[in-house]
Image (cartoon, grey):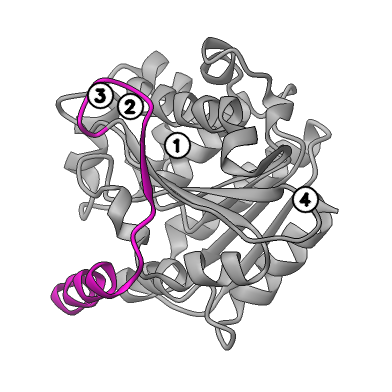
Amino acid sequence: MKRWMERQQQQQQSGPAGTDIAYGEDPLQHLDFWRATRKDGAAPLVIFVHGGGWEKGDKEMARGSAKVSHSLERGYAFASVGYRLVPSATVEQQAQDVADAIAVLVRQAATLGIDSRRIVLMGHSAGAHLAALVGTDPRYLDHAHLRTDALKGVILLDGAAYDVPRQIAEGGTFMHDRYLEAFGSDPARQQALSPTFHAAAPNAPSFLILHVARADGTAQSEQLGEALRKAGTPAEVQGFAGSGLKGHMAINRQLGEKDYPATPVVDAYLERVFA
């Protein structure tokens, strides 16, 4: 973990900063935006939601990462969303922050050179949970005056807590207290914050659900994919090598690197949904 944090800090220092855009009054309600250069008109947009166990992290975690540079090379604009953190904010407020950030980018599409009809939401870890929640529970986008089809798709990177009650029951002791801090002990609230329980339509048009070889992440990903497909929403689930915290971090840190196995999978998905 220490080595990953050191590398993350090096990436943040070495990579180009995006344009800071506020979408709310709180200091954490900001996003970074990188404009893509295209000769054929407005650019598709990838919006990234960082992880950190719902209580850590910020928008600058994407700075210097291969995800940003690779997206720009392919002609896709990129945004990294910051959001308020537990315990100062609730998970419900975090999901609304993500939806509100999407809405600001949609409203500013013409100025930013974005094709607002081609937007994909991507998240890692806790950010994958929030992306999945926004993509399945329409109340967050509704509140931001958007429909679920404002997104062309959702990409989830080794997420957790798609089924919160199951995650708490089966996830072991490593994150148990953090799950309870984020989701509480009320079963009704836990279900309300579980994307798998919202898999019935309407949903975002399609999902790409990626995971590494972690038992709980694999089970949660497969369960969500099955629930979405049962409801008629296309959902591809694919696993990759890597275990424990190292594998969990690698799928986020190395995505976009040409020799990382998940990169061509994401590339093919984006080509398909942005076509």
Q: Which residue does the image show at 26% across and 48% down from the upper left? A: 58
The residue that disc 1 covers is: 130
Residues under numbered marks 2 and 3 in contact, where contact means CB atoms less than 8 Å apart: no
Q: CA distance from mark 4 to mark 1?
A: 30 Å
**Does label 3 or label 4 sit earlier along the sequence?**
4
Q: Which residue does the image show at 62% across and 52% down from the upper left? A: 222
Residues under numbered marks 2 and 1 in contact, where contact means CB atoms less than 8 Å apart: yes
Amino acid type at circle 4 is Gly
**Does label 4 or label 2 sit earlier along the sequence?**
4
Q: Nearer the viewer, mark 2 or mark 3?
A: 2
Determine crowd level at label 4: few under 14, some 14-19, many 20+ residues with C-alpha closer than 10 A: few
Span colored in magenta: 1-28
| 187 sits left or right of 122 in the view | left
Amino acid type at circle 3 is Gly
| Residue 184 disc label | 3
Whether residue 238 appears in this view of the structure is yes
Q: Position of residue 50 (x, y in %)?
A: 37, 50
In the structure shown, which secondary structural element does the residue marked by tag 3 occupy? loop
| 191 sits left or right of 71 in the view | left
The residue that disc 2 covers is: 91
Q: Quadrant of residue 23?
A: top left
